[in-house]
Each structure stands twice: as structure tokens, then as C-alpha cells.
Amino acid sequence: MPTTQSGVTQNAEQTDISWKILFCTAGLISVKIELDLLQFNVTTRTVPHNPIFSFYDWLFLFILARSKSQTASFLKLNKSNEGKIVKKIIECVPNFSEGRNLAVIQEITDTIESVQGIQLLDVDPGESTNRTVVTFIGEPEPVKEAAFRAVKKASELIDMTKHSGEHARFGATDVCPFIPVAGATMKDCVAIAREVGQRIGDELAIPVYLYENAASVPERQNLAKVRSGEYEGLPDKLANPHWKPDFGPAKFNKKSGATAIGAREFLIAYNINLNTTDRRYANEIAYEIRERGRWKRIGNIAPFYYKGDVVYFEEGKYADGNSDFVAGTFEELAKFYKEKYGNDLYERYKSIGLDPKNLIGRPVYKDGLFTHVKGIGWVVEDYHCAQISMNLTNYKITAAHDVLEAARRLAVERGIVVTGSEVVGVVPYDAMQKAGRFYLQQMQKSTGIPARDIVTTAVQAMGLNDVAEFDIDKKVIGLTLQEGPLVNLKITEFVDEVSRDTPAPGGGSIAALAGALGAALASMVVNLSVGKGEFDDQYRPLCELAEKAQAAKDELVRAVDADTEAFNEVIAGMRMAKDTAAQLDLRAQAIQAGYKSAARVPLRTAEICRAVLDFCQAAANIGNMAVMSDAGVGALMAYAGVQGAIHNVRINLPHTKDEAFIAEMNAKLGSLLSESKALCDAIQTQVESSF
């Protein structure tokens, strides 16, 4: 059995960290940095044998402390986008090598805000690091433009020959990652990173390296490797063909250095609240959860693991951190670890700042429960409680609700109660949707409910109002809201608007609304069936059906305004100049193209309404007699939507003057109408037989 050191309690593993925070606030480290910093090689900063905290831990704690005070400014969202449909939302977090000259920082942020459609969320300068982290969001095109303008402005204002600071850096704009927030994918962000990177290289002659998910080769994924040597090492780096930039010249830009452009996942700052003010208890659970894990201990480890004796590596005795296995060599241990857990033990110890070739006398590490989690325990005096304070660096792999449930289980084992949790800053809708659906499934409730209801479920289940208000409208980015002058009218206002002597809204909008109501009724039938004992064996397929109906409903509601807007292209063509033969020809082409667009929008409405009929049929097939009539009404509304939309397609077709297009569209319309009529009739027969 490997030797242990008695009497080493959590005080040695965790110890009072107030002195570290004091150092930070005194100016040694005075910046809220982007999490890229945590990729530093910190092997020289670890303390032999009994490290109190690694450099990762205490710097991370300070970042979290700073983030508390930054929440208010982080939530100052531009009100101009409230109530709009969120399409693709991208976050950009550029880090500039200037943290002392506020005038320079102001010029850069003014440049960012000059781009229409950009919301500047946070500006965080640090004096000792001489670095500023800026956070802004928007749709792809504005974000790309704002990022480029910011890099350009930084290249004009920041002279790297005069720069000094405690943070690693190699350029005026040091790093610039793009993050998918809502409706966007990592693929989108990679494409944006490469497009912006190429433009920076071509137009500004700044060497650009792609990192993380945007990396051109695997070895450039790690920012620390890309930035190794920093600004001072760039001349040698650029002279090495192996480190040729992805974009821009392989030539030292003395004033601006180089820039790393990347794509990464959204970072969620998430805290779990405990019914205690004992930091040791918060650390006890944090160490179990976080990816870094904790020292392996034996002996008195239940219920509080920190009370056990620490296990160390010694000659000929290499203990596995997660089991009783002991190997004779590290190579043997690494082989066992790979076979049992599927991971690389060499990389595991390197990631926590330890050299696998020099482990004798060092503590053995037990794995944490989750990857992509950085965490530590602390006490928040304002809340009168201890918190497990975490950064979730990839919520798509490690979800907040999974971490919370693990914390609840670990807390119960120790007689501790989780009273709730807290999101610091903002959170993507996708993360809240996943959490809401998880808790609905736990309750055997339908997951096919409106988006806001799903988020509300998550807020309640996770106790997100426990220590601070969780305002859904401010805290959740990407919650799909309906946009348009029509869908936001009251029912009486909408009906009055239709009745007026204006061509829009007209039949197309009404067709879309009819289909949306049909989808809503299909969802209602399903949701009223879920939870009834006789339908328990259908829970999963019923939820899937309700979710599909909700998605169709939302798209058809958007089509209410889209149909009215579809004719705008025709109107734009009609307004074109017509003084010459060439102008007349261009005008005719534009009008014809406009009519094609005006035909495609109601065609899509008809196709969705056809799908809604399938949902109504499935809803009727559930056999819930109490709501059978609602399934029938839903089908009638959906069929009306199909017919109405087809009318609006056909009225536009002759104006396209494209026989091939007309023939293609008529073929689609014929099958849509015949299928829809047959299905609607079958549903009505089924419904009527139930009375």
C-alpha cells in the first residue's frame, strides 16, 4: 500500500486563501481575463508535496470573485432586439493588450458599437496585466464586421514594442474567439473565425493563427502552444516554416505582433448554493465534481473525503486515483488507466501541472466526475451561504443540470442541503431548454410545451431565484420570441387590421394563423394525455409529437408576418426605374423574381400545415376521448391553412412568367391538396365515430 501522510486535512489541500485574494486586489493580478489564461503551462507554479491550490485554482477563484461584481454591467443588454425572433447569435470575446489607457479602450469599444446590430455586454480592463477583455454579441455579419474593425483600431492605437504586463500575449489584439449562443453552430463560428482571420491577414498584414475549434492542425488547438514565446519570440517563430501563420504574412509585425482567432463553446458561470457557511463543505463537493479532481485519500473518507490521509507516489508504488490498483511503474499505471477509463494518464497529470516523469513524493489525483468543469468552494457573505462556484466550459458536454444533480446527491451523502443555484451573467437558451426538458421528463410531464414554459421549469427546478433574481428576459440569450407587427397585436386588433381597406394582411397570413392554431390544438391534445395512467407507455413518443407540434406552431406564427413581407420584393421591383429599355428589362426581371419569392412563402406555409395534419392524426390516434373533438378541429384548421396557402401560391404564379417554375409549383400543390384533403377527411370520420 502506498504511504500516506497522517494529519494532512483539507486545510493543507485547500487552506485559507484570503492572502491570495489580497495579493490579487493589491495589484499582482487585477483583471478578469478570458478563460484562455487557464491553458497556461503552470508546472513552475505548483508547490511540491502539499500544494495549497494550483495556480489554476486561486486565479480561477479570483476570476469568479470579479465576475460577481461584473454581473450588472454584463446584463446591460441593448433593448432594441427585445421581442424579435432570434436567428443566429454569436458572441465575440476579443482580448486587447491595453488595460491602463482608458481612452484607448474607449476608442476600441466605440468602434465595436458603431456597427449596427451589436450589443456590447462587458468591458473589463486590468491594470497589472495591461489587458482588456471585451464581450459583445450579435448576428454573424455584424459580429464579423465589429471584430475586424476592433482589431484594426487596436492595430492603430496599441504599440506592442511598448507593452508590458503580467498576462501572456503576442499581439495588440491577442485573442479573438467566436462563440455560438443561439441558433448558431460551432461550424458557423469556425467559418467566421477563418473569414475574419483571413481579412485581418490580408488587409492589416498581421500574422493570424487559428486556435481551438478553428485550428487548421490539431497541435494549434491549444492557445498556450500557439502563443508560446509570446511577442518577444515572434521573429523566431515566424521564421520557422512549421509555425507559418494561417493567414497574413510570415513576417514580424513589430507594432501589432500577431493575433489568435478561434472558435469555442459558450462559458457558463454557474454556482450551487449550500445550507452552510463552511467553505470546506463547498470544496468537498467542488473537488468531486470538477475535471481537475482532487488528491486521493484513504482511511477516514466517509462521509467527508477531505478528512482522510493523502496518498503519494513512491518508488515502485504508483496508485490509481480511482481504485485500489497499485502499479510498479507509471507506465504500467498509465496502461491500466487507459484500459479501464479510456483516457491518457500522461496528459491527465500534465493538465494539472505535474510532470509524469517526476511524481515521486507528489499526491495521487482522483478524477473528477465531469469534464469541462472548473470549480472551487467559497463563501458569499451577502448570501450568507457557501457556494460551489464553477465555470462550465462546454455545456453541450457537461450540462448545468447534470452537475447540479450530482451535487445534490453528494450533498445528501454528507448531510448537506443544496438550496438552489445561480447563473452569473447570461446563459444560452439551449442550455436552459435542455435543463427544462430534463426536469419535465423526471416528472413525466410533456416536453412539448412553449419555450418560455420550459425555461420557467428549469428556473424553478434549479432554484435559480434562491439568492438573486433570475429575470428570464435578461438572463437567457436566444429565447425565441415572435417578431412582427401582426403577431403582437391583440386578437381584436388583428381582426380589425384584416378587415381594413389594405391588401395586407390577407389570406396568406390568415392561412398561416389557421395552421398555427391547428398545431397548437394537436399539442394540447397530446399534453392533456401525458400524465394519464393509460398513456404512460407512450410517454416518449407523445413528448416527441408535442415537440414537433410546438415547432410547427412557432414557424407558422412567424409566417403570419412573413407572408405580408413576402410581397415587398415585388413592390421593390415595381419601384425600379423604367425610363429605358434596359431599365424596363431589369425591372421586369426583378418583379418576376419577386413573385417567385411571394409564391414560395405560402408554399412553405402549405407544407407545414400538411405536416400539422399528420400531428392531428397522431393526436387522434392516442385515443383520449375527452379531447378527440380538439384533434378534429385542429385538423380542420390545418386543412384550411393548406387550402388558403395554396390559393396564395396560385395567384402569384402567372406573374412569374416562367412556365417551368409554374409547372413545378403546380405539381407540388396538387399532391399537397389531395393528400391533405384525404387526411383531413379520415380524421373527421375518426372523430365523429367517437361521439
Image: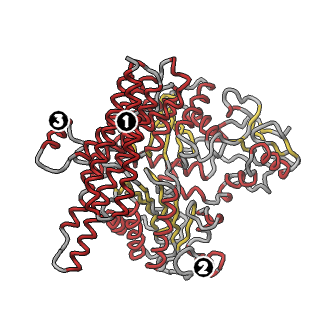
**For the point 75% across and 41% down, which residue is it?**
321
Q: Earlier in the sequence, mark 1 or mark 2?
A: 2
Q: Position of residue 174 (x, y in %)?
A: 50, 67
Q: Earlier in the sequence, mark 3 or mark 2?
A: 2
Q: Marks 3 and 2, how far apart in space?
A: 68 Å
- Which residue corresponds to mark 3? 492
- Which residue corresponds to mark 1? 519
Residue 505 visible at all: yes
Residue type of the residue flagged with mark 2? Leu
Disc number lying in front (1 or 2): 1
Q: Position of residue 511 (x, y in %)?
A: 28, 42
- Which residue corresponds to mark 2? 238
Indicate the quadrant where residue 655 lies: bottom left
Q: Marks 1 and 2, how far apart in space?
A: 59 Å
Residue type of the residue flagged with mark 1? Ala
Residue 438, above or below 532: below
Judged from the image, the secondary structure of the residue bearing numbered disc 2 is helix
